[in-house]
Amino acid sequence: METVIRIVILYTVIIAGLRILGKREFGQLSPAELVTLLIVPEIVSPALVRDDPSLTNAIVGTTTLFSLVFVVSLLMHHVRPLETAISSSPTLLVSDGRFLAENMNKERISPDEIFTEMRKVGLYELAQVRWVVLETDGKLSVIPREGAGGHASGESSSSVGGG
């Protein structure tokens, strides 16, 4: 029964921490947020398997981690050079119906991945595309040329490999 109580307490602390950090879908996690979610199990596991007899270290560790993420996100929001240093910027992969091979190679995005996203918005020829952008969250945005057809939104947002 002690294990159940420990899990309930740690679950509550983690959920509270995630709520404080703000809403964001898991597919839209920044690298810092992903690292945070990967570190949490390492912090709380000793308390769950009773290697650490108290919950205090797990709670303090988790709270410290979430506080660090919160402070860094505030600083990134207010200090532009820090945001630039930590976050990536969008990368143009297609411009006016032409692949930008150097950018595609740098981001490790294949033409097949781009064509997949184009089909999702109803485009079947590269000539129909004004831009394809690899967004900072790893998703591809497909922007059709005017009059090229496609869905009303004109944008696709599927997560792909690359950075």
Image (spheres, rainbow, N blue to C red):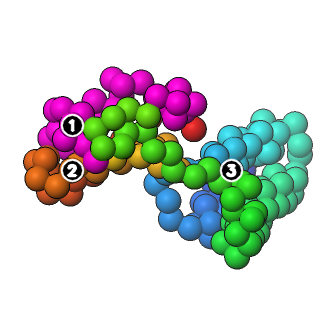
Q: Which residue is mark 3?
A: 32
Residue at image coords 46%, 28%: 101
State which region is magenta. Answer: 101-130
Q: Which residue is mark 2?
A: 145
The crowding category of the residue bearing disc 1, from other C-alpha atoms within 10 Å (few below 14, some 14 to 19, many at least 20), is some
Q: Which mark is residue 12?
A: none
Helix, strand or loop for the magenta stretch, by majority: helix
Q: Nearer the viewer, residue 55 or 116?
A: 116
Do callouts 1 and 3 mark residues in contact (Cβ within 8 Å)? Answer: no
Tell me how far mark 1 sits from mark 2, CA to CA.
8 Å
Amino acid type indicated by mark 3:
Ala
Tell me how far mark 1 sits from mark 3, CA to CA.
37 Å
65 above or below 141? below
Helix, strand or loop at mark 2: loop
Residue at image coords 79%, 45%: 43
Q: Which residue is mark 1?
A: 127
Amino acid type indicated by mark 2:
Arg
